[in-house]
Image (cartoon, rainbow, N blue to C red):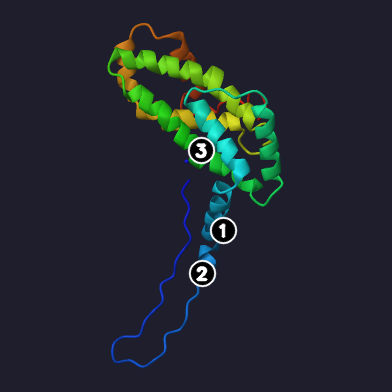
Amino acid sequence: MTRSFAPSLPVEFPKMGSFRRPRPRFMSSPALSDLPRFQAARQALQLSSNSAWNSVQTAVINVFKGGSLQSNELYTLNENIRRLLKSELGSFITDYFQNQLLAKGLLFVEEKIKLCEGENRMEVLAEVWDHFFTETLPTLQAIFYPVQGQELTIRQISLLGFRDLVLLKVKLDDLLLLAQPQLPSSIVQMLLILQPGATPGPGPRS
């Protein structure tokens, strides 16, 4: 999961009947106001074409699909991330994880829930949360363990992503009415952790 673009500036041609030579405009010289966006797009393109990052991306999407890491794969992924952190792309990894990779992975989770209807959807939500919280989340933390010192940890980013990209899109209020009077214990746990206004705890450092 990667989108990137480079700004293109059209050449201005003179109007019919005018002999004034147009001033050249170069794609290699974006306007100063566009530089941050241009640099971010360039970094995204470099990251998406980086073989070390591609191995990380493939592993993460596989985890969201229910897969697990192969023998010694975690060590390799950690080493790949360490190399990326030492490159000019290092400061971009967390943003890319949050805005691209996590969003793509959670889309699989959301679609699985939306395939079910009525009371069955609550049961599936409980199962999905259990798997996410006990399997997917710890694996993401392990993969991105080398990423330290960020404002939000990988754990916090992932939990907030589940809340915003999954929980808030499945019409939770309607599900809670259907599940009355007894909620599954895993749903109660989920609500306590992801309730609006709460900041997911740091858990193990990642």
Left or right of residue 68: residue 112:
left
Rendered location of residue 12, percent (x, y): 39, 79
The tag earlier along the polypeptide, 1 or 2, is 2
How far apart are the two marked residues, 1 and 2, measured between alpha carbons?
Answer: 12 Å
- Say what amino acid the circle numbered 1 marks: Gln
**Distance from Cα at disc 3 to Cα at disc 1:** 19 Å
Q: Secondary structure at mark 3?
A: helix
Residue lying at the far front in this picture: please name it: 71
Q: Quadrant of residue 57?
A: top right
Q: Is residue 192 visible?
A: no
Q: Which residue is mark 2?
A: 31
Task: Please name the residue that numbered disc 1 is placed on.
Answer: 39
Tell me which amino acid carries mark 2.
Answer: Ala
Q: Is residue 134 above or below residue 79?
A: above
User: First in sequence: mark 3 or mark 2?
Assistant: 2
Between marks 3 and 2 in the image, the one whose residue lies nearer the viewer? 3
Q: Residues within 10 Å of mark 1 (few under 14, many from 20)?
A: few
> Which SS class for mark 1?
helix
Residue 185: image x %, image y %? 46, 9
Separation (CA) of disc 3 from disc 2: 30 Å
Above or below 182: residue 50:
below
Residue at left 56%, top 22%? 68
